[in-house]
Amino acid sequence: MTVTEVEQGRIRSPFYPRQARIDRLNLWHDWKGYLSADGFYDTALEYFAVRNSTGVFDISPMSKYRISGPDSLAFVDRLVTRDMRKLAPGRVAYAVWCDDEGQVIDDGTIFHLQEGVYRICSQERHMSWFKAAALGMAVTIVDETAEVCGLAVQGPTSFSVLDAMELDGIENLRPFGLTTFDFQGAELMVSRTGFTGDLGYEMWITPGKAFDLWDALFEAGKLFGIRAIGTHALDQSRIEAGFIQAYIDFLPACVTVRPGRSRSPLELGLEWLVDLKKPNFNGRHALAEEKLTGSTWRLVKLDIEGNKPAHHSYIYPRKGKSEACGFITSAAWSPVCKQNIALGTVRTPRGNVGDTLYVEIYYQREMHWSKVIAEATVVAKPFWDPPRRRATPPERF
Amino acid sequence: MAGKYDAIVIGAGHNGLVCAALLAKAGNETLVLEANERVGGAAVTRSFTEGYSVSAIAHLLYQLQPQIEDDLELKGGLTTEKLGTVALSRDGNHVRIGSDDDVSGVSVEDKASYRHFRKRMTRFADLLNTYLNKTAPRLASGASKSDKLTLARLGFDVRRLGRREMREFLRLIGMNIRDEVFEHFESALLRGAISLDATLGTRLGPRSPNTILTYLYRLAGTHASLRLPTGGMSAVSEALAHSARENGAIIHTGVKVSRIIVENGHVAGVETESGDIFSSSLVVSNADPKSTMMKLVGSKNLETGFTRRVHQIRMCGSAAKLHLALDGLPSIAGVEGSEFGARFLIAPDDAYVERAFNYVKYGETSVKPVFEITFPSFRDSTLAPAGKHVMSAIIQYVPYELRSGWSVDTREAFRKVAVETLSDYMPEVEQRITGWELLTPADIEEQFHITGGHWHHGELALDQFLFTRPIGGAHQYAMPVGGLYLCGAGTHPGGGVSGAAGRNAARVILTRENTV
């Protein structure tokens, strides 16, 4: 009898052997059962790759659900809060989905692959909810998380890298557009999407071609400063872009136990995604009601004085003694903006754009704790939003 | 056909008729659309073979709420005198339960125990009955003053039973009937009879939790005094339809609604299978919650959490109906010819009922099924030719989803099993059969448009009762589509020819909607 070894523990992405080759830190964490790198050599350098050249992040662990069938449009349209009838084939939409109480379950991107065929990409897994949402509808839902692997190629030189790969017509791909190429006999899908708020693309391919894609990409990117990056660099970038993340800036409604711990899209600054003119979608009743009666919470982007990141800080309405009105969920010193930035949650009516709030920051110097009360201004726009993010065709380097 | 109405009621089951009659009585122009050719839904008399008719599903009247007879001024004469029960024994030593709770064929101790048992049960059933005839209160935020009052009164009424009886009530309400009858009675026949009454029409065995609740539910209202309407159950339905028409309602039969039209989150009317559209901003469905929400409204018009919960309502029927045309009454050992007006039970002890139930859990039919039998033609000559008779029997347990699938063969196989079991008690019954009809839960679904063929439009269990019937948050008849209400057995309080759901729904609608 022969004993074969069974692979156990976290799943390795199809790109893992390539990543292992360049990895110097051996810092990995779990992302929905997959091994995902915190960083590969130096997280600061990786961050600067995203902002100054090109960073490549492995998005293979992203949940990917393929929705097809006669009711596919009806399905996605009822699932999310925005109007999906407006999403043409070849386009991608950022969307958020709620439970019946109008509380956010997750956000993600929806790819209209071809007429009536969609792919929903998200950080969390959602088969159970999608199956429930499919009751009474003629749709097929396939979890293709393992069948499609992906790389986010993000940064100012990313266009030049893809151009050097000879992806014909890539210069015409607009933000939130998607297109396909033949890549060594396999279909390579490229979408102009990302989680960094910068010029960037996401490339999707069958796992069998993972090495080839990686090699071709890094070969083409040699002169454009291409670097693999881990979650640290990505997290830094997404805070600068003002993007929220499940389990950090909000909890998926399906995992909260205590009342008031979940958030509605209105409370997360995603009102622009909620189309109450649609006759029906999950959470519509509750959101229409909330719109009338007002929200409890508000997500704020804060520009904070000083240079000490306000991790987990309380937010106060006044400098003097007062009751906390909220807390910070994501914080970072932004090297590219030269700003001390944060995302936070405050109780309404606090947190209007332009309001001054106060953040209690604790920091350590040689074991001893100190604190400062730093002034923070509520800002409207993302901290980092360069024109190149939208430029079509993008600038060549 | 087309038209615009103040209210449209889908389905002329008894609850739909009660609701329509009350809406019309309040001055609303009300249209009732019934898919079948006759009104009544599952309370209907049908011919099943040339010259023989029978109450097709429900065959005894014991739950019709007295308030409804008053509200709708139903004239008496609907029914004959109360029926006694004979729990059959193969050796002829039957146990007889009179309509006055007097039991014969048991020990002196059992007699006394039964009186005591019935006294307690009817007291609890009376308590329950008050709340069956009220809208179940809201528990969560948004509870109105009357919700809070109802809830407080429920608590107060339970407390008012006295410390001992309150404890008994709280102990018994979730319990199974088998433990209770086993504790009180030595007579196996008596234990079997009560076990059968507690589980009739459900997908529960006597050892299943909350079968005391189902027993209490049976007693609520009239203490389960059994009556056989002359002319079968259609007599009740026709009386209700007559009352609805008298109040101005229009009833169309043979018109099947295929869709409830929803526009911008509010009902706009209904579309029939033939493509006719009837408009109304108020639609009341007597159909079960699953049919109404998943088929007629469609999940596209509803939210996911809601449809998931509707989808999960347990409603697989396990009661079949067997109708036999007989060329004469079969002889039963120890039963006089004059006794055939009674109700007969084949449930010789509680373990027999539980064993019969086991099969249905695995998608099989009982090898020795349980029977509730009447010979309605014995009192009612309209149902069979002179000298001939009709037998109407409820048989348990027969699964909605037979593992081997329902076909001509599997149905015939079960009919044989049923007749064999009957022959144990009525040896010559097989020779007397001149025609028959077997309705499995799958047939009931198809012919009476009840999902799962479940009489109660949803299992009657603590998790689908009061505040959670049909589902929590939607238990006050209004559905999460503007102008849409349910009024059938799937809503509070539940099934049985009681009319309580239809009446409660009408009262909610008349309070909430800006009707005439």
Image (cartoon, coloured by chain):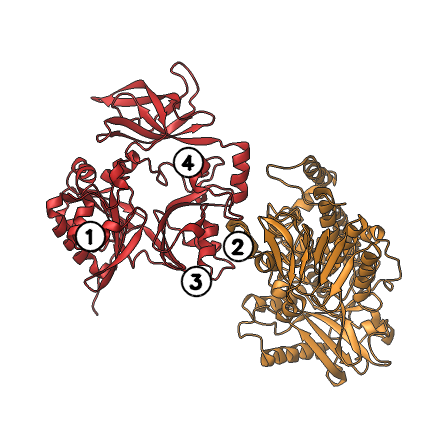
Chain colours: A red, B orange
Q: Are marks 2 and 1 on the same chain?
A: no
> Residue type at mark 1?
Tyr
Q: Chain of mark 4?
A: A
Q: Chain of mark 2?
A: B
Instruction: Give the labeled residue for mark 1.
Output: A16
Q: Secondary structure at mark 3?
A: loop
Q: Position of residue A221 (x, y in %)?
A: 14, 48
Q: Are marks 4 and 2 on the same chain?
A: no
- Depth order, front residue of A177/A281: A177
Distance between mark 1 and mark 4 Cα atoms = 34 Å
Q: Position of residue B292 (x, y in %)?
A: 62, 57
> Residue type at mark 3?
Gly
Indicate which disc residue A69 carries: 3
Question: Which residue: 79% across, 66% down?
Answer: B234
Instruction: Give the labeled residue for mark 2.
Output: B300
Q: Chain of mark 1?
A: A
Instruction: Give the labeled residue for mark 4.
Output: A268
Marked residue nearer the N-terminal end (1 or 4): 1
